[in-house]
Image (cartoon, grey):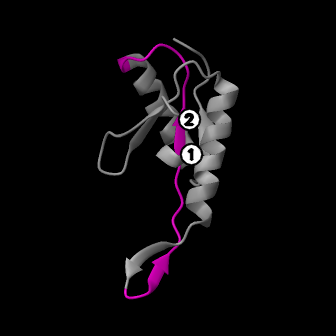
């Protein structure tokens, strides 16, 4: 994930299978482009599971813009669950800034 973001952006693991990508100063359209690039990279990269075996992996994501805090993270999390509910391997964008 770090290789798909700018210097100064932050990638952090926040749960067992959840990550946050912070893009300071980036508009929502840039966040959506980064998210699309991340999902495409995950989708097209075979993951080695040992013994010369690989598996295909997909991901879902939630995109939200605004001031970093609990409300922003909750909005991104709600968008993530919207993406998962829509069929996974996609992202959803939170509808408005709080």
Residue 74, compared with residue 96, is above or below; it is: below
Give the spatial CA distance, label 2 vs label 1. Answer: 7 Å
Assess whether mark 1 and mark 2 are in contact (beta carbons under 8 angstroms): no
Residue 30, compared with residue 34, is above or below; it is: above
Element type where label 1 sits in the image: helix
Q: Horizontal and vertical percent for residue 31? A: 62, 31
Q: Is residue 69 left or right of residue 35?
A: left
Q: Horizontal and vertical percent for residue 84? A: 52, 48
Residue 2, compared with residue 43, is above or below; it is: above
Q: Is residue 60 left or right of residue 10?
A: right
Q: Horizontal and vertical percent for residue 20? A: 42, 36
Q: Which residue is mark 2?
A: 6
Residue 33 seen in the figure? yes
Element type where label 2 sits in the image: loop
- How many numbered marks are there? 2
Q: Horizontal and vertical percent for residue 28? A: 65, 24
Quadrant of the image occupied by residue 74: top left
Decide whether the magenta segment is chiefly helix, strand or loop: loop
Quadrant of the image occupied by residue 77: top left
Magenta segment includes 60: yes
Magenta segment includes 48: no
Q: Which residues are magenta?
A: 51-70
Q: Which residue is mark 1?
A: 4
């Amino acid at each position: 994930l770090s290789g798909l973001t700018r210097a100064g952006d932050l990638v952090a693991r926040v749960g067992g299978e959840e990550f946050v990508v912070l893009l300071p100063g980036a508009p929502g359209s840039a966040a959506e482009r980064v998210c699309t690039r991340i999902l495409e990279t995950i989708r097209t990269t075979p993951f080695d599971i040992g013994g010369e075996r690989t598996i295909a992996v997909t991901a879902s994501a939630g995109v939200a813009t605004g001031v970093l805090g609990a409300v922003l993270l909750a909005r991104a999390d709600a968008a993530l669950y919207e993406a998962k509910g829509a069929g996974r391997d996609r992202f959803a964008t939170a509808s408005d800034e709080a």
